């Protein structure tokens, strides 16, 4: 898939997830970070990996987001 198109789809997926994540639930499962900041961080790292070609075999942004959600090791810069 075209990397620019994949990036656009990943941005849309993270925006959708961040807007649907309730503040209360998020604060119960993470530390002092807002959902927006958390997903912005994930998005930044996902875009970096897309540009490196990590997800060149993926067919959609949803596929990328799901892979990252299930295994953060897809993100070489994740700590």
Image (cartoon, rainbow, N blue to C red):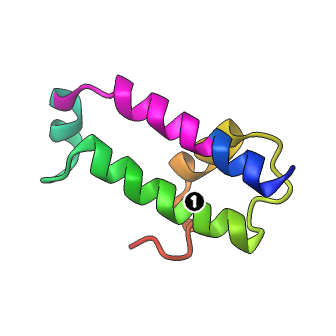
Q: Residues within 10 Å of mark 1 (few under 14, many from 20)?
A: many
Residue identifier under label 1: 46
With respect to residue 68, does 73 lie above or below? below
Residue 48 position, x and y percent, is: 60, 69
Give the quadrant of the C terminus: bottom left
Residue in the picture at 47% in, 28% down: 16
Residue in the picture at 57% in, 59% down: 46
Residue 63 image-quadrant placement: top right
Q: Main secondary structure of the magenta part?
A: helix
User: Is residue 38 shown left or right of residue 54?
Assistant: left
Residue 67 position, x and y percent, is: 63, 48
Residue in the picture at 64% in, 67% down: 49
Residue 54 position, x and y percent, is: 74, 67
Residue 28 image-quadrant placement: top left
User: Is residue 28 shown left or right of residue 39?
Assistant: left
What range is drawn magenta here?
10-23
Is residue 8 inside the magenta stretch? no
Residue in the picture at 69% in, 63% down: 50
With respect to residue 18, does 70 lie above or below? below
Number of dots carrying numbers: 1
Which of 57 and 44 lies nearest the eye of the viewer? 44
Is residue 14 inside the magenta stretch? yes
With respect to residue 52, does 59 lie above or below? above
Residue 53 image-quadrant placement: bottom right
Label 1: which secondary element: helix
Residue 30 position, x and y percent, is: 21, 48
User: Is residue 24 shown left or right of residue 39?
Assistant: left
């Amino acid at each position: 898939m075209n990397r620019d198109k994949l990036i656009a789809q990943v941005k849309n997926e993270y925006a959708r997830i961040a807007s649907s994540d309730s503040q209360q639930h998020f604060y119960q499962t993470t530390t002092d970070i807002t959902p927006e900041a958390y997903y912005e961080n994930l998005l930044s790292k996902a875009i970096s990996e897309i540009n490196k070609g990590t997800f060149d075999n993926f067919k959609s942004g949803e596929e990328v987001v799901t892979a990252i959600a299930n295994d953060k090791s897809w993100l070489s810069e994740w700590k």
